[in-house]
Image (cartoon, rainbow, N blue to C red):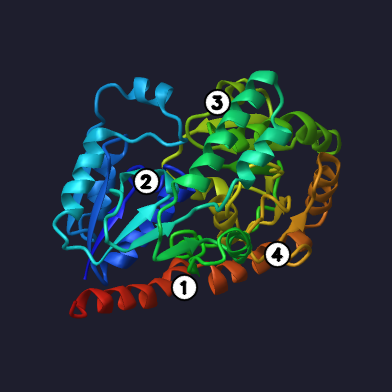
Amino acid sequence: MRLLVLAPAPPTPRSGGGSLRMLHMLRFLGTRLEVDLVGPGLEGAAEAEARLRESCREIEFVPPSAGGLRRRVLRLGPYERDPALAAAVRRRLATREYAAVQVEKAAMLPYVPPGDPTPIVLDIWAYGLTGARRALRHEPGVATRARNLLRLARFAAFDAFRWPATHCLLLVSELDRQHCLRERPDRRVLIVPNGVDCRAVPAGPPHDGRPPRLLMTGDMSFAPNVSTALVLAARIFPEVRRVHPDAELHLVGRRPDPRILALRRPGITVTGEVPDVLPSLHAATVFVNPQVTGGGTRTKLLEAMAAGLPIVTTSVGIEGIEARHGHEMLLAEDPGATVAAILRLLADPGERRRLGAAARRLAEDCYDWPRCLAPLDGLYAELAALKAAPC
């Protein structure tokens, strides 16, 4: 069976959770199917080609067309449609060689030609408009609110009028499945959770020494991560330092926003991009993610779980992950509760070890990538049979 995968960016492990999901999914599918990958020729294309050379039959990253700024300004919908990339997709689908086209993220839906009969499998990293609505509620400033309102209107219009018929929607959690079926009860859905490579992210030894180190990881240009880091540095960390004057806060992740860079001071380290996040995970005492905006399932939480770290987060931060308060992590819904939870863990090494070990077991039992991706086998066996059936 031959499968066409449309990616919104080159899949590399350094480009965020969605990119990591694509990378592992392509490796999984490449052992079972003939996979062709098409996407925009953005940063990371050469690295993605090197990593996926053995998994994909063909890889085509199309250089962006001229006039991208004009298209972004004039477009009505939330997603850009590059003419050169659209032509490449249209040319491939016109061959009728593909049993299905897997579209990574709704941003790539405009590249499927209207009326094309190839079955569409749409992989949705975070279902619905929850993230945009949370941003509208929580991110301050008139200009920011206006930008978020326009973004919400564009996404809502696209959802209402531009979604094509799909053979199946791939969703990351049971929560997303429930949201989807309320809005689209006629759609077929399949839960394919986000995962973590438990072999590549082994559990580290508990960090019981001094100084205690709090850790947050993620793309530090992504608006929900920026707002989370600002709250962590301004409202939570100073209160922790009142009790533990030698405590450290490490903010680890690529492309730090200027507001994140401005947080650098004694006790607060902003690393920028690191070649491997594992040393940061193993050097941390507590992983903290007081997130109140964004949507979907956060790979950074799964990495912290696999590393055996005790975690303090919110219900938004742990959304879509079957971790329980007091069992595999601690829930804290506001800065005051977050401070209390951190201080509790810093005072109790045994509790840190217990939560970290439980988080690691959950990662191994439920979120290792082969287990998460296994539902794709049945889906593509069915599509292969449909392609092989006589017309």
Viewer-nearest of discs 2 and 1? 2
Q: For this rendering, which residue is in front, 104 or 17?
A: 104
Residue at 20% in and 41% down = 87
Indicate the position of residue 227 as horizontal and vertical percent values: 66, 32
Residue at 67% in and 62% down = 356
Q: What kind of element bears circle 4? A: loop
Q: Earlier in the sequence, mark 1 or mark 3?
A: 3
Q: Amino acid at mark 2?
A: Met
Q: Amino acid at mark 4?
A: Glu
Q: Which mark is residue 328?
A: 4
Residue at 19% in and 43% down = 88
Residue at mark 2:
108
Q: For this rendering, which residue is in front, 70 or 350?
A: 70
Label 2 close to label 3 by CB (< 8 Å) = no
How far is the residue under mark 1 from the one under mark 3? 35 Å
Q: What kind of element bears circle 1? A: helix
